[in-house]
Amino acid sequence: MDTGFQKTIVFLFFIFIGILLKAKFKNKEEITGIKKIILNLALPATIFIALLGIKVELHLLILPVLALGLNLLLFLTVPLILPLVGIGKGTSEFRTAKLLIPSLAPGLSSFPFILEFLGDDYLAKAAMSDLGNKVFVLFFLYLVAMNWHYGLQSDQPKNEGTKLKPLMKAMVSEPVNIFIAVALLLLGFGFTMHSLPFFLSETLEKLSMIMTPLVLLFIGLAVKIKRKQFFQIFSLLCTRAGLVLLISGIFVSVAGIEAQNEILLILAFGLSACSFWPYAHIAAVDGMEMDLKDKKKTFSSDYGVAILALSFPLSTILILGVLNSGSFFVHSYNIFLISVLFLAVGFAIPLFSGLNKKWSGLKGLGFKLKSPATENV
């Protein structure tokens, strides 16, 4: 059994442990405590280390731009897709999905497999590509989340000046943003983790080490997926996979890429699971809206956790399938074929669900109409 697959089993096992521990966490406040540790300690430390560990390779600078392009294309396309899978516009679920679906978490989902199947050189390319994704999930989506929050919850007239002041205040007060600012400042002066005093770098590394286990345990503890919600999210994630493959196929065709490993890298990276970092923005907004009813909130925290919980195993299966496909995806028409297949599955699930509801309604109506007639006989 390869190392990448074993790592995935470990990750899934942490989620499973979280599910098993649900009985021990009877109060929502207890789970919220774990979330606060993640958002205020583990996540800032992880981001700080990641930023100070950036090694910019000039000949690979196009990669983060391409990754950011994928993020933005998904961000622009997702709002068109969500109503088709049964997520109504203007709902908290709509905004939650719009924030999470375009994000990527290659560190958890694709990096282990890229290393195992393609090697160090391709992992370096994937890591470089992730810089663009980091810009998207850390900065762009944070601004989007806060903009939506202040746009929806502010009682004052919606002008840019009104929204900008609280937005800037929120940015300065968030631990994650403080760590990002300090890391970027140090990076600008040429600092790395090795340049920091030992006690500081060691503390940050220890905090970062608890990030992944805590996030996975939190997902297991917090996830509450109803049957209808499961199929809706599964449909959404299949559609996401189809879109990623479609965009990747177009890029491969236009760029004329024929190298097998390059194509596999593009597909595996794009099929990464949804990132936890946008959920951190959702949680930050959720903390500002504690007094509001769920229907009036900007985001649905529970729906976000459900997306994360389903995204990881599905992405793992897809990435493993891609990396084990050999030369199948060298021909771009195969990428388009699989893309259409996933889009068809994604759109078919809500379609069949809707038809099933109508059929059930007609059967019920038929029974009601039949009953009086029977009585008259």
Image (cartoon, grey):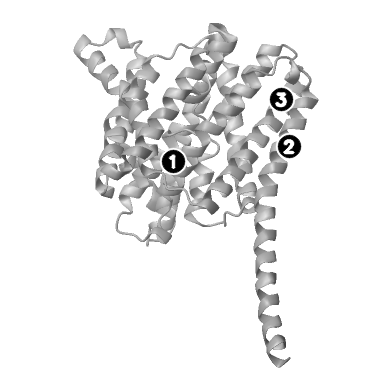
The image quadrant that residue 292 belongs to is bottom left
Quarter containing the C terminus: bottom right
Task: Indicate the amino acid at tag 3.
Answer: Phe
Residue position marked by numbered label 3 in the rendering: 251
Task: Indicate the amino acid at tag 1.
Answer: Leu
Q: Is residue 6 left or right of residue 271?
A: left
Q: Which residue lies furthest to the front in this view?
A: 377
Q: Between marks 2 and 3, how big is the CA–CA gap?
A: 19 Å
Q: Looking at the image, which residue is at 67% across and 36% down?
A: 243
Q: Which residue lies furthest to the left in this view?
A: 199
- As rendered, which of 67 and 168 lies closer to the eye? 67
Residue position marked by numbered label 1 in the rendering: 143
Up-down relation of residue 153 to residue 187 (above or below): below
In x, y percent, where is residue 60?
Answer: 57, 12
In x, y percent, where is residue 142?
Answer: 43, 39
Q: Between marks 1 and 2, how big is the CA–CA gap?
A: 34 Å
Nearest-to-viewer mark from 2 and 3: 2
Q: In this view, does 263 lie to the left or right of 303?
A: right
Residue position marked by numbered label 2 in the rendering: 341
Is the residue under label 1 in contact with that under label 3 (CB below 8 Å)? no
The number of discs equals 3
Q: Looking at the image, which residue is at 54% across and 20% down?
A: 129
Q: Between marks 3 and 1, how big is the CA–CA gap?
A: 28 Å
Within 10 Å of disc 1 (Cα), the crowding (few <14, some 14-19, many 20+) is some
- As rendered, which of 231 and 335 lies closer to the eye? 231
Q: Looking at the image, which residue is at 39% across and 38% down?
A: 220
Q: What element carries label 3?
A: helix
Up-down relation of residue 18 to residue 348 (above or below): above
Task: Indicate the amino acid at tag 2.
Answer: Leu
Q: Earlier in the sequence, mark 2 or mark 3?
A: 3
Up-down relation of residue 34 to residue 181 (above or below): below
Within 10 Å of disc 2 (Cα), the crowding (few <14, some 14-19, many 20+) is some
